[in-house]
Image (spheres, grey):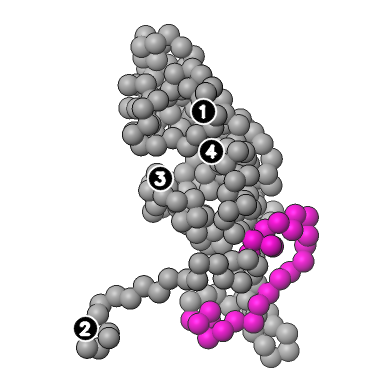
Amino acid sequence: LIRSLQVEEVIVTPEETSWKDRLIDAISRLEGSQARISVVPSLYEILIGRIEHFNIRDIPLIEVVRSSGDPVAAFSRRLRDIVFAVFLIILFLPLWVVVALAMKLSDGGPVLYLQNRVGRWGKPFRVIKFRTMPVGSEDETGPVLARADDPRFTPLGRFLRSYRIDESLQLINVLKGDMSLVGPRPDRPEFVAKFVQEIHGYNERNKVKPGITGLAQIRGYYHSDPAIKLKYDLAYIYNSSFLLDLVILL
């Protein structure tokens, strides 16, 4: 078909649920285990993947889940987060004052909105945002994912959400150590409990600090399916570097 139709691009989709996805899901639930788990690669996996430099006798192996526990890298990332966060807070401070005044003048309600999110290793924390909806907007419905055309947004809130200004206060969460500048976006506990049951390997993203932005935010869409966002998050986690962080931030 490629030859006869002069096809330029072919995309092969994976099985809906493969044993490899189930394996990643099972490993992601092994909290506290230090076991190294590897697979013998096929030619296909050698073609698309990176072979780690270890083997059993003469058989090459691919480590299924790589550890992200390098203390030097962790210290470097934390220092970088603090320096960038302080700089950006100083830069955004005048804007925050204007937003706070505009919010008080528009409806007189509270400026800040604190929301429970799930952080590294499943530890809960409270994320800081500018309020974009009326007080009590979820009293009747319970937790609901916001949509781009969500009627619950206030006029000012819709503007803040359009330019993600409401999320900029999370620089304070970065200073506190709850978040990093770059990483998977933190989800609410109610949604995490649902996604862990429905999406294989979802727990794996909780092994790093959540971020203000990430690969899923610049490559996916705001309302992309969580399973698609997970693929971007895992691609970032296993290939993270200072250069990649810088590209995402820019």
Which of the marked residues, 2 or 4, is nearer the chain's N terminus? Answer: 2
**Label 1, label 3: how far apart the Cα atoms are:** 19 Å
Which of the 4 quarters of the picture holds residue 155?
Answer: top left
**Label 3, label 2: how far apart the Cα atoms are:** 35 Å
Residue 243 location in percent, x, y? 46, 56
Nearest the eye: 192 or 37? 192
Q: Amino acid at mark 4?
A: Val
Badge 1, how many Cα within 10 Å: few under 14, some, many 20+? few
Q: Mark number for residue 83? A: 4
Compared with residue 69, is residue 41 higher up or lower down, i.e. above or below? below
Residue at coordinates 52% horizontally, 23% vertically from top-left? 140
Residue depth check, mark 4 versus mark 3: number of the one nearer the observer: 3
Q: Amino acid at mark 2?
A: Gln
Q: Secondary structure at mark 2?
A: loop
Residue at coordinates 49% horizontally, 50% vertically from top-left? 226
**Label 2, label 4: how far apart the Cα atoms are:** 52 Å
Q: Mark number for residue 6? A: 2
Q: Secondary structure at mark 4?
A: helix
Q: Which residues are magenta?
A: 24-47
Badge 4, how many Cα within 10 Å: few under 14, some, many 20+? few
Residue 249 location in percent, x, y? 43, 46
Q: Are marks 1 and 3 in contact (CB under 8 Å)?
A: no
